[in-house]
Image (tube, coloured by chain):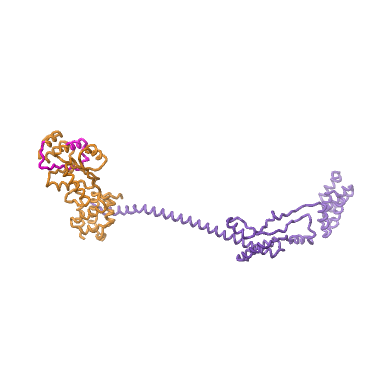
Amino acid sequence: MLNVNDLEIRHKKYKIKSYVPYFTIFAGVTIALISIASFFLYNSKVEISSELEEQKQPIVIQKTEVIAETEIKEKNETVQEAVQNKIEGTVAEPVAIKDNVKIEQKQEKVVLSPSLNFMNKMGSNGRTNNQELPKEIIIDIKQKDVEPKVEPKVEPKKAEKKAEKIEEISLDIDKKNPINIARKDEQEDLSHVIKRFNINHNPALSLFVAKKYYQLGDYEQAYNYALITNEINNNIEDSWLIFSKSLVKMNKKDMAIETLKKYISHSHSSQAKQLLDEISSGKFK
Amino acid sequence: MKPSIYENSRDVFLDTVNAKDYIQLERVSTIYQSLKDSIEKPLKMVLLYGKPGTGKSMFLSKLHHNLASSQKVCLYKTPILDESEFFKTLAQDLYGIGYEGELNFTQFIKVVENKELIGATVPLILLDEAQLYSTPMMEKIRLLSDTRKVKFVIALHKTEKEDIIAKEHFQTRIWESIRLENASTSELKIYIQKKLMKVNCIDTASMFTQSSINLVHKLTDGNYRDVNKLIYTLFDIYVYYANNNSNKINKSEISTKFIEMAAIHTGLIDA
């Protein structure tokens, strides 16, 4: 006997069953499409971001050109100021002047001169002018052509192509403009310091000279500058000690002991006491 | 549409072997004609083979029906496996000789050889499901056919075993083999519609569109027996809905759902 109701139920199940492979295929294809689409989207995003980076790079180069132009016009400005201009220029200057700048860049050579502003600042801390600067310290910044330099970090191929068009700025001081700090003769050093002392009568300088003369074995001069220092400021312990040591070296041991005792009586310096003991015992000669 | 039309349509497809239900299809007609021609030839044996449900039994039935009036024809739809019984039955049917007790092959072949042919026609024996006969039995059938006093038409399933039988026992004999095959889509459409038209179910015959025929063919592979079973169940479902929920019936064409339901019921769809 035909059970149609049961047949209908079985038919329903059969239909659901028959749709399963189609559904599976559809789901599989959909997943595959989504994954492919997302893969391509991700790739395109990466490409866009890399393109953006590429676009950013030439802007930097163009701005560098503007900077170079600024530097040409303001030859007397310091490197630091130039760098400041660079930053300001990146914000303010439009990119459109690129071609003009290129031409100018090719025709003119940019010359940088060292700034002496930092020396003036040093002078304000106790020195009156540039002449007082120690000659033994030479900042050797040669005047060179400044070339715009492109950093080949992002997209080297394109950057190279653009770099061909644009002159590079080279601020690489380490290679091309080395700063040589050379120490010359100690006597010369002393003479410079003495000169400066003669101008500003700074007891620190006279004490430095006293110590230096003592090290060099010129005990008379050490004695003199220790005495000068002491006259300016008699509370500087080192001046007393150098003074006493110099006396000992000049075979004036008694005078040295007397001087130290006077100093110890009002300062109670342990260092002075120790020196006194050493001199008295004969350890210090 | 009255429920009775579905009932009539359903009953047409009852799986019975009846010569009256024979449907004249072009290819089937050709095959039938070639079979008839083979029988008229001085051939000892004719082999009719094909898969189950391809119409072998129907062919034999039709042949028996058509030839019975003109010549001596015996149709054995089921094999007689007992040897003595087989020969006794043949003696009775062919020559009207009744035997009590045992009748062995030697005795029967003597009877056959001694019998004079009535006219020029050789009596025809149609053996259906011949694959069920044993090999010695098949050998004895071959020897009987060698007497030229009797002709055999053997219908069997085409299997590996039947192939061996054919090769071993009949290869050297003068015989003809006719192969029956499943119906094609177009043949199936004609088959179904002709069957329905025979009982004047024109409305239901017109409901079979090409798509529904294609589906039936897909499910049955054109096997007549399966087609009969499927369509029978299909119209049974129609009868149910016509009696209980006639709104579900689309009278313009056969419902795919109903075909699938019928296929589930007949086991053609594993659900």
Q: Position of residue B204 (x, y in %)?
A: 22, 58
Q: Is residue A228 left or right of residue A91?
A: right
Q: Is residue B113 above or below residue B208?
A: above
Q: Is residue A238 above or below residue B48?
A: below
Q: Is residue B42 left or right of residue A237?
A: left
In magenta stretch: residue B139: yes
Q: Looking at the rendering, which quadrant does residue B203 occupy?
A: bottom left
Of residues B233 and A135, which is closer to you in this image?
A135
Q: Can residue A268 be spotted in the picture?
A: no
Of residues B265 and A34, which is closer to you in this image?
A34
Chain letter matching colour purple: A
Q: Position of residue A270 (x, y in %)?
A: 81, 49
In magenta stretch: residue B16: no
Chain letter matching colour orange: B
Q: Can residue B148 be spotted in the picture?
A: yes
> Quick one: which residue is furthest to the top in this view?
B106
Q: Position of residue B142 (x, y in %)?
A: 19, 37
For the N terminus of chain B, which image quadrant? bottom left
Number of dots carrying numbers: 0
Q: Looking at the rendering, which quadrant does residue A98 occupy?
A: bottom right
Q: Is residue A270 left or right of residue B40?
A: right
Of residues A151 and A181, which is closer to you in this image?
A151
Q: Looking at the rendering, which quadrant does residue A55 occupy?
A: bottom right
Residue span colored magenta: B114-143
Q: Is residue B134 above or below residue A54?
A: above
Q: Position of residue A112 (x, y in %)?
A: 71, 60
